[in-house]
Structures are given as structure tokens and as C-alpha cells.
Image (cartoon, rainbow, N blue to C red):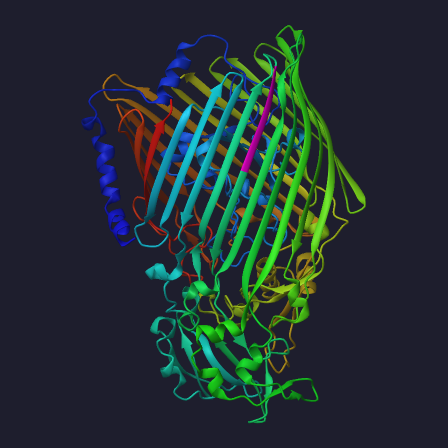
């Protein structure tokens, strides 16, 4: 890897040199496939083929319609430097919302990837594969809402990705409030392709490898297509980046401490700290503390934290069609995915009698004491020994028949689609014997029920061996599953001829059933682990039925109206919930080059199954920040002793079967101007609103609100503050141990919230073909959020999230790229602009940032292509020290720095 990293350091200069020297290297101009296709399209003056575009079930001849649709092609994945489907989607301008990514660390779903279109949350974007639903990821995002994982789609078989933003429930049903992502796979290929990609990071870590094998064949009436993708990626640890390898400005972590809980004095540990000085990479020191000393380190957090998960994936896709005759074709698609993911967010630690007040009566001293120890990686055989691991398996199948109804203008499709997702997680946990390991046998309890021990301090201060660690640590296994099945019949055709053209109609009927189950490690209920938390299996199913229709009416030659309506009915938990939604659209073309468009839609989201069926569960967060105590102590977050405490606070969570569907509305208007086939520009306005939104605040949001209520930033008598006070309980100020500390946080869902947003999207494209300098293509796009408001409860005032210093959503994003094709060479230079977001401490903004990606592709011969891709050419890493370690804006920017890879593709068999 060292060699790879050294080479990567020289890639930007080399790549820029190649970008500038392409014309000199090329001997003759040979237009690439895309350019040739475009030229052929220009020459073809016949009637264009009609295709389905996301957002409608009526085929159309043009991409542009009453609603804007963004398209990412397979070629864009390489040219723009996208590593996979998720990478392409997360870089969309319209993906303005903050989500908990793999570097967020302490999440419920670090093995999954998702997006938040328009900042409305991952549960309000519908994700489709070839127009069909996939099973939800079986573990709820943030422990609350269901979403679709984007990690299991092999990029080699992707034809294009279409993104519609705005409501589309009248076409697709539930979930399509903020938008729809439709990943459309290739349907045909001749011959075979082998693709090998190797890459890494110039600053170290994160080496990655990928092998793809794709192919297809047509023989008579049978057409087949397949793809196999194997990939492997190393993790990126905090210690791999100098700027976050230590925490010099933060309060050091007490890795070894002994404290009298009544006097709050630390007891002296002798020379234990010097004996353990080599732990945590030689950072352990003796630190004076009240009444004595303890052993501390600045490296505890960085030692155990992965900012990029390690991953090994295996994905396969197979497709076949068989033409029964000219009018009817059978089809079948199968997608298999497997992912092994691992990360690390905190190391093993122990606090004495943690299941009984976290302190004990020391019979040797007669004092109530609290002992604690953070176990170092050197004691257990390395940090990887304490990784969390996920094994995910996904399966999707669709089969049916499509074709033309003889003697009519109608086409049809009847299909079954099914999707299954299974996830198995393994988490290291302390066993119930850990107290006796460090304290010796329990001698009983005092009159208050406090445990009594007669411990030997040497057991606390001794260096552990990996074998000893294995005796006090087990592996907790949880199994989660989700599935969905759908029967669907669709048809579209012309009903009658109007003066301005044919009236087209599409209909759909669907029957579906879906379910999930979360099976935690029930061994914890039997006292196997060092925990008193009880867990239960959570599971549920629901049925759904839908009927819908869509019409396209040419009112005039220049004016077309569309209208769609759909009724969805859900049955779950002994009750029914039905919702009718509709949308309308207008397309006005006063001239051939000009399109004026507008749309209005209603939408809905059926209650998340996790919200409905969640059994009463208790647990603890991996880390928590007590914002109220930081504020009361007058301490900034980066220096606050109550920030990023690990392990975090306990929580109590329960579901509700009385939830109703969320209601959404959206409208938009836009203009598209295409004066020629080589230039077009568009401007669109959008407005999206959600009412009756199910709210189940994250613990971090609750703790932030508590601080705002407690410091007068919010009215303490407001509905939000009263609700926060009812959810967060604290230890009494007179408690012997941990006074005023959060005891538990209660979270449960209700229909109460409101959220709305509006903004604009601007896009332009210009293509230039020359006789001697090759072909050029410029693409520019920009999205700006104009308003973003939310309200937690009906009695609350609307909050201005756009100007809130608590919101880390993007205010604006943009892209600019230029592609150059000449002879056997093609190259792309792309710039991504990210607008301002608040600093971690909320006292200012981080400046906007622009990142550059570059790619060069060379056609070695007609079968072999070599590509060089570099992301973040200038090796920029955004820093933010205002919130303390890890000193960069988690979830908004990557700490990886420059990334690059070499890709070789070989085609044969045709």
C-alpha cells in the first residue's frame, strides 16, 4: 500500500498533464460511442421511440415533461469519478439533507447507505430497481424509520439512474414524498467484459479493489444478460489521519481510575501509569486529579474509531427475456447481493458494578468506590479484535410477461416481484463475570443494596492478555430480516383521437405484502452479559392494495395536461389505513425550442413498520453529549467534559399501532430552452410540504432541545420543551454517584410534525463538435434551498431550519464539468461546489468548498480500455475544530483526502 500511496501523490499533476496533452497524443479523431450515438440521433428524423420516464407510466418520446427528471448514465459513473450507485446519488445537488454516514460511527445502520432528497429524510425517498420496490433495510435508520439500502447494486450493469424530486404517490404509492430514485439496469449486451479496478488514498488507508465480469448473448427468441461484481475495501481509521490521530485540546480520557464517590477524590494508583505507558501507542501518562491521580490518554477515541467502514461485497445479476411471438415476451430478473462490513466506534471499557449504580462498597477501605478501566488494543491483540461485523444478504426477483394486445394500441405488463434482505450483526460485549474478574468475588450487599467487594488494586492495574480478555468478552449476535412481495398489472394505450393528438391512458393494479423481524441476542435476558437491559423480538407484517390511472390529454398542439390518481389501502396491526393521492401536470410548448411546465401532487407515506411494531426496548447509545451541562458549565463543545461521553445514555423505546399516514403536497414550475441539439438550459422551482409527520426525535436532537429550553433559547413552557422534559430523566442533584447525569431518554412516535422546503434547480448543457480538436461537452447545474421550515408539535412556532445553526443540511450545491473526446482518448474534469454549513459549535459557518475530480480514458485497442480516475485532485480535507475531536464536519465532508484508482476493461466474445 505504501507504493500505491506514493504514486497517488503524483497523480493530480500527471492527470492534469494528460488532460492538457490529449490532442497532442491523438493522431486522428474517432468519435466515442456516446458521440456517435448522438450523431446518429441527429441524423434520424423519423419518429422517436417512446420510453417510460420515471414519474409516469405513459411512454413518451422526450425526457422533459411536467416534472424535472435528472439522469445519471453508466458512463457518468466513471467520468465523474463515482465509485458506485450510492456515490453518484449522494453527490446529487438535490441530495441536500444530512444523513448518518459510515463516518458517523455510532449509528444503527453503519453497514447501509442512503440519501435524503431535499433534506426531507431517507424515509421520504422511494427507491426503485427497474421500477419495482426493494425490501427495506431490516434495521431502522436512527432506530426509528425504514429506508432502502443502496449498497447492493452492481454498477457495471446499470444503464442509467433517473431521479424525480417531488411527490409521486399517485404513480408509485407510499414513500414518494420528496422524490423517486429509479435505478434502471441494462437489458441487452453482446459479448463479455472483464473490468479490474485498483485504488487507494494518497494519505494512507482505504485501499480498494474491484472485479467485474459482465456479458450477454442473444440467440433467436432468447436474450440473456448477467453481471458479477466482487469488491473489497480497507477501513480508514482516525489514527490514519494526522489531524485527528490525537485529541490534544480535549480533556484526556481516564483509562484507569479509582475514585471515592462520596468525597469525589481520586485515589493514587502508584506507578501503574508508568507500567502501562506503552498502551494506546505510548500515550498513557499519570495525571494529577482531585485527591490523587489517574492514568489518562489523548488517543482513546482515535484508536477505536473508523471513519470509513471496511467492506467486502459480492453481487450478481441475471436477466433473461424470451419472445413468445411478436407481441408477447416473458422476462425474469434476479439480483443477489452479499456484504460483509465492519467498523469500530469505541473500545472495550469497564466500570465497576455498572448494573448496580456503578459503585461498590470496598470492604478493605470501608469507602464507596468507583473503578474504571479502558482496555487498550495492545491488551487484546489489536483494535480489530473489537470490531462490529455485519453480514448482509439481499435477494430480489421479478418475472412476468409484457407485450402488445393484438388489434389495439395497448401495451401491458403483468409481473411478480419479490425482495428479501437479511442482516446478521456481531457485537463484542462484556460478559457477566467482568466485575468478579477485576474485583474478586462478590461478598454480599449493604443495607442499601450496594454490592460489597474486597478487591486487590493489582487486578485493576495489571496489563491484560488477549486470552484473559477472551474470558470476559462474548459475541452478541442479532438477526434481522425484511421482505416484500408484489403482484402488479399495468397497461397503457391510446383511448381516442383528439384534435390535438391522441388521449393516452395508463392503469395499474397492485397487491402486496411486506414484513420484517428484528431478533436481538436473547441470551442477554438470561444474564449472560454485563447488562440488565431486557430485549424482545420485534416483528410485523402488512398488506397493501392499490388501483391507479393516469391520462395524458393534448389540449392544444402546444399544450398537454396530465392527471393521475391512485388509491392505496394498507392493513396492519388489526386496522386499515387508506389514502387517495393525485397529481396534475401541464406542458406548454409555445415554440419547438421552449417548454414551460408546472405540476402539483399530493403524496403520502404509510407509517413505518418499525414505528408500529416496535416492542418496548431499552439500551444505551454508543456515545452522547450532554449539551445542557456543557451550557451550564460555560464550556465550549470542543473542551466540554460532558461531550462525546462513551458509553452514552440509556434509552427506552416503544412503538405505536395508532399511527396514521403522513400527508405530503408538492408543486413546481419550470422552463426548458433548447435552441439547438447542442445546447439546453432549464430552471425549475419546487415546493414540498409534509404534515402529520411521524416524529421520534433522535437522542441528540432531544438533548440539544433540552439545552435550548434550559438556557432560555426556547420558551420553557412551549410544547417542545414540555415534551423534552417528559422524555429526559436525570439523576437527582443529591445522588451519591453521577448527580444530575441523564438517567434515561424516552423515545416513542406520534403524528405531530410539519416540515416544508422550497428551492430552485438550474441546469445547462453545451456540446461542441470540431473537425480537428475533438468533441467537448460542458455540463453545469446548481441547486439552492430557498426555505426550509419545521415544527415539532402543532402549538410550536415554525422553525427556520435554513438559517438555524443546528441544521447541517446543505443550503446550496453545484456542479460544473467539461468532457473532451478525441481519437482514442476521453477525459473529464468535474468540480463539485458545496455551500456553507454551520460550524459544530453553531457560532459561525464553514466556508463553501469546491472539490475537483478528474478522469482519463484511453482506448488501447478495440477490446481494451484503460482508465485513470482521481477524486479530490487538490487533496482537500475540510477541518472544523469548534466541536472538538475529530476536528472535521462528520457526515458532511470526508476526511479521506485524495483518492485514485486505475481501471482496466477488456471486451471479448463479440
Main secondary structure along the magenta-highlighted residues: strand
Residue in the picture at 46% in, 15% down: 593
- Residue 425 in picture, x, y percent from top left: 56, 56
Report the front residue among 460 and 606.
460
Where is residue 204, by image quadrant? bottom left
Is 820 above or below relative to 426? Answer: above
**Would residue 516 appear left or right of 336 to someone viewing this image?**
right
Question: Seen in the image, is 53 located left or right of residue 11?
Answer: right
Residue sitting at x 46%, y 37%: 228
* 114 shown above or below 730: above
Residue closest to the eye, 639 or 92: 92
Q: Can residue 759 be seen in this view?
A: yes
Q: Nearer the viewer, residue 854 or 26?
A: 26
- Tally of numbered tags: 0
Residue 315 picture location, percent across and down: 49, 40
Which quarter of the figure is the C terminus placed in? Answer: top left
Q: Give the vertical position of 503 relative to 166 (above or below).
A: above
Q: Position of residue 866 (x, y in %)?
A: 29, 34
* Magenta residues, start to end: 328-335
On screen, 284 above or below 666?
Answer: below
For this orientation, the residue located farthest to the top is: 499
Q: Does the magenta stretch include residue 187?
A: no
Q: Is residue 745 visible?
A: no
Q: Residue at x 35, y 36 (%)?
A: 830
Q: Residue 160 appears at what percent x and percent y?
A: 48, 29
* Residue found at x 37% / y 83%: 275
Amino acid at each position: 500500500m505504501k507504493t500505491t500511496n506514493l504514486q497517488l501523490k503524483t497523480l493530480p499533476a500527471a492527470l492534469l498533464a494528460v488532460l492538457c496533452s490529449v490532442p497532442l497524443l491523438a493522431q486522428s479523431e474517432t468519435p466515442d460511442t456516446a458521440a456517435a450515438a448522438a450523431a446518429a440521433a441527429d441524423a434520424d428524423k423519423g419518429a422517436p421511440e417512446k420510453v417510460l420516464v420515471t414519474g409516469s407510466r405513459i411512454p413518451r418520446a422526450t425526457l422533459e415533461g411536467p416534472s424535472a427528471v435528472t439522469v445519471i448514465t453508466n458512463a457518468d459513473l466513471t467520468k465523474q469519478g463515482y465509485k458506485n450507485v450510492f456515490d453518484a446519488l449522494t453527490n446529487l445537488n438535490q441530495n441536500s439533507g444530512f444523513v448518518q454516514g459510515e463516518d458517523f460511527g455510532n449509528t444503527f445502520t453503519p453497514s447501509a447507505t442512503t440519501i435524503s432528497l431535499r433534506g426531507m429524510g431517507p424515509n421520504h425517498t422511494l427507491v426503485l430497481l427497474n421500477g419495482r420496490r426493494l425490501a427495506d433495510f431490516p434495521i431502522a435508520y436512527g432506530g426509528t424509520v425504514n429506508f432502502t439500502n443502496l449498497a447492493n447494486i452492481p454498477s457495471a450493469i446499470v444503464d442509467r439512474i433517473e431521479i424525480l424530486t417531488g411527490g409521486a404517490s399517485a404513480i408509485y404509492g407510499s414513500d414518494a414524498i420528496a422524490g423517486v430514485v429509479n435505478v434502471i439496469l441494462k437489458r441487452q449486451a453482446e459479448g463479455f467484459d472483464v473490468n479490474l479496478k485498483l485504488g487507494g488514498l494518497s494519505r494512507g488507508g482505504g485501499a480498494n479493489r474491484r472485479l467485474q465480469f459482465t456479458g450477454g448473448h442473444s440467440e433467436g427468441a432468447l436474450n440473456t444478460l448477467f453481471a458479477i461484481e466482487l469488491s473489497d475495501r480497507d477501513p480508514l481509521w482516525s489514527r490514519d489521519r494526522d489531524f485527528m490521530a490525537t485529541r490534544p485540546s480535549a480533556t484526556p480520557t481516564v483509562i484507569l481510575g479509582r475514585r471515592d464517590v462520596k468525597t469525589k477524590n481520586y485515589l493514587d494508583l502508584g506507578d501503574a501509569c508508568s507500567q502501562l505507558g506503552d498502551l494506546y501507542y505510548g500515550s498513557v501518562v499519570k495525571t494529577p486529579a482531585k485527591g490523587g491521580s489517574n492514568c489518562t490518554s489523548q488517543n482513546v477515541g482515535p484508536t477505536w474509531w473508523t471513519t470509513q467502514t471496511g467492506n467486502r461485497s459480492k453481487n450478481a445479476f441475471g436477466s433473461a427475456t424470451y419472445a413468445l411471438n411478436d407481441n408477447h415476451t416473458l422476462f425474469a430478473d434476479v439480483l443477489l447481493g452479499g456484504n460483509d462490513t465492519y467498523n469500530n466506534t469505541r473500545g472495550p471499557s469497564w466500570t465497576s458494578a455498572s448494573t448496580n449504580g456503578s459503585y461498590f462498597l470496598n470492604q478493605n477501605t470501608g469507602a464507596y468506590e468507583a473503578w474504571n478501566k479502558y482496555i487498550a488494543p495492545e491488551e487484546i491483540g489489536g483494535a480489530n479484535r473489537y470490531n462490529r461485523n455485519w453480514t448482509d444478504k439481499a435477494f430480489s426477483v421479478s418475472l412476468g410477461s409484457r407485450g402488445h394486445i393484438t388489434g389495439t394500441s395497448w401495451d401491458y405488463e403483468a409481473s411478480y416481484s419479490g425482495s428479501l434482505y437479511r442482516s446478521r450483526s456481531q457485537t463484542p460485549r462484556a460478559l457477566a463475570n467482568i466485575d468478579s474478574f477485576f474485583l474478586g468475588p462478590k461478598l454480599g450487599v449493604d443495607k442499601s443494596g450496594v454490592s460489597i467487594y474486597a478487591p486487590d488494586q493489582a487486578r485493576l492495574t495489571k496489563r491484560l492478555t488477549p486470552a484473559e480478555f477472551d474470558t470476559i468478552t462474548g459475541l452478541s449476535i442479532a438477526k434481522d430480516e425484511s421482505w416484500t412481495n408484489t403482484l402488479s398489472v399495468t397497461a397503457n394505450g391510446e383511448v381516442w383521437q383528439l384534435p390535438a393528438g391522441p388521449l393516452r391512458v395508463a392503469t395499474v393494479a397492485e397487491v402486496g405484502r411486506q414484513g420484517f423481524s428484528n431478533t436481538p441476542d436473547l441470551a442477554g435476558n438470561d444474564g449472560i452479559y454485563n447488562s440488565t437491559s431486557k430485549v424482545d423480538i420485534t416483528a410485523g407484517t402488512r398488506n397493501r392494495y392499490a388501483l391507479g390511472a393516469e391520462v395524458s390529454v393534448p389540449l392544444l398542439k402546444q399544450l398537454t395536461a396530465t392527471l393521475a390518481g391512485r388509491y392505496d389501502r394498507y392493513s396492519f396491526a388489526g386496522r386499515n389505513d387508506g389514502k387517495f393521492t393525485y397529481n396534475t401536470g401541464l406542458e406548454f410548448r409555445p415554440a419547438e425550442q421552449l417548454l414551460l411546465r408546472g405540476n402539483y401532487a399530493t403524496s403520502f407515506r404509510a407509517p413505518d413498520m418499525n414505528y408500529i411494531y416496535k416492542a418496548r426496548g431499552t439500551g444505551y447509545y454508543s456515545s452522547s453529549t450532554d449539551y445542557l451541562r456543557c451550557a451550564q458549565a460555560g464550556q465550549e463543545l470542543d473542551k466540554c467534559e460532558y461531550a462525546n461521553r462513551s458509553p452514552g445514555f440509556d434509552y427506552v423505546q416503544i412503538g405505536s399501532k395508532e399511527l396514521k399516514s403522513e400527508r405530503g403536497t408538492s408543486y413546481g414550475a419550470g422552463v426548458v430552452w433548447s435552441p439547438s441539439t447542442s445546447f439546453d438550459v432549464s430552471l425549475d422551482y419546487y415546493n414540498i410540504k409534509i404534515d402529520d409527520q411521524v416524529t421520534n426525535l433522535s437522542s441528540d436532537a432531544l438533548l440539544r432541545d433540552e439545552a435550548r429550553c434550559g438556557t432560555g433559547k426556547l420558551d420553557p413552557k412551549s410544547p417542545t420543551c414540555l415534551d423534552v422534559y417528559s422524555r429526559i430523566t436525570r439523576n437527582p442533584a443529591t445522588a451519591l454517584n453521577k448527580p444530575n447525569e441523564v438517567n434515561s431518554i424516552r423515545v416513542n412516535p406520534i403524528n405531530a410534525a410539519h416540515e416544508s422546503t422550497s428551492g430552485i434547480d438550474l441546469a445547462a448543457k453545451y456540446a461542441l463538435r470540431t473537425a480537428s480538436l475533438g468533441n467537448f461537452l460542458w455540463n453545469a447545474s446548481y441547486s439552492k434551498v430557498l426555505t426550509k421550515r419545521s415544527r415539532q408539535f402543532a402549538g410550536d412556532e415554525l422553525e427556520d431550519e435554513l438559517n438555524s445553526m443546528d441544521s447541517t443540511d446543505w443550503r446550496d450545491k453545484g456542479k460544473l464539468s467539461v468532457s473532451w473526446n478525441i481519437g482514442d482518448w476521453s477525459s473529464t474534469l468535474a468540480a463539485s461546489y458545496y455551500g456553507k454549513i454551520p460550524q459544530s459549535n453553531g457560532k459561525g459557518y464553514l466556508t463553501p468548498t469546491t472539490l475537483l475530480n478528474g478522469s482519463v480514458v484511453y482506448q488501447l485497442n478495440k477490446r481494451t480500455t484503460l482508465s485513470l480516475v482521481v477524486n479530490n485532485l487538490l487533496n482537500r480535507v475540510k477541518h472544523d475544530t469548534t466541536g472538538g475531536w475529530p476536528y472535521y464536519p462528520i457526515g458532511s465532508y470526508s476526511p479521506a483526502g485524495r483518492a485514485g484508482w486505475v481501471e482496466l476493461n477488456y471486451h471479448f466474445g463479440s
